[in-house]
Image (cartoon, rainbow, N blue to C red):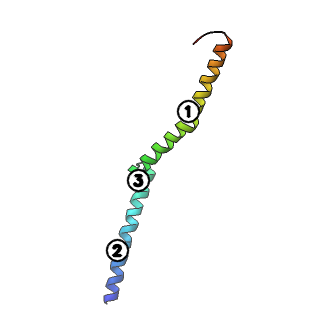
């Protein structure tokens, strides 16, 4: 009888853990992001800006400066 009680308690604890995981998955599917997810998105956005957008802007400004110098204008 004591072992049955122990098994029931362990099953109840497992059910609580599974319920918690289900809640986390539901939140994730609804788009609610936790602090870690928000931080990760911010880091990805920053890296995208530094690696992709930054060099593109430098190239565009460089091309514009070369075009202006060809036209004989001073900046």
Is mark 2 in CB contact (under 8 Å) with mark 3?
Answer: no
Which residue is nearer to you in this view: 33 or 50? 50
Q: CA distance from mark 2 to mark 1?
A: 54 Å
Name which of mark 1 and mark 3 comes first in the sequence. Answer: 3
Marks 2/3: CA–CA distance? 23 Å
Residue for point 68% across, 13% down: 70
Question: Which residue occupies 38% across, 72% down?
Answer: 14
Mark 1, residue position: 54
Mark 1 element type: helix
Counting from the top left corner in percent of width and height, residue 27 is at 40, 53
- Vertical side of 68 occupied by 54: above or below: below
Give the residue displayed 44% in from the left and 53% down from the top: 28
For mark 1, does the 10 Å Cα neighbourhood hold few (<14), some (14 to 19), or many (20 or more) residues? few
Up-down relation of residue 48 to residue 14 (above or below): above
Q: Which mark is residue 12?
A: 2
Tag of residue 27: 3
The image quarter in which residue 65 lies? top right
Compared to residue 5, the image places residue 50 above or below, namely above
């Amino acid at each position: 009888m004591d072992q049955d009680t122990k098994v029931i308690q362990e099953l109840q604890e497992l059910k609580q853990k599974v319920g918690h995981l289900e809640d986390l998955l539901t939140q994730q599917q609804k788009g609610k992001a936790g602090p870690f997810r928000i931080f990760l998105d911010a880091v990805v956005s920053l890296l995208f800006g530094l690696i992709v957008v930054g060099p593109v802007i430098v190239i565009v400004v460089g091309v514009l400066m070369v075009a202006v110098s060809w036209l004989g204008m001073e900046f």
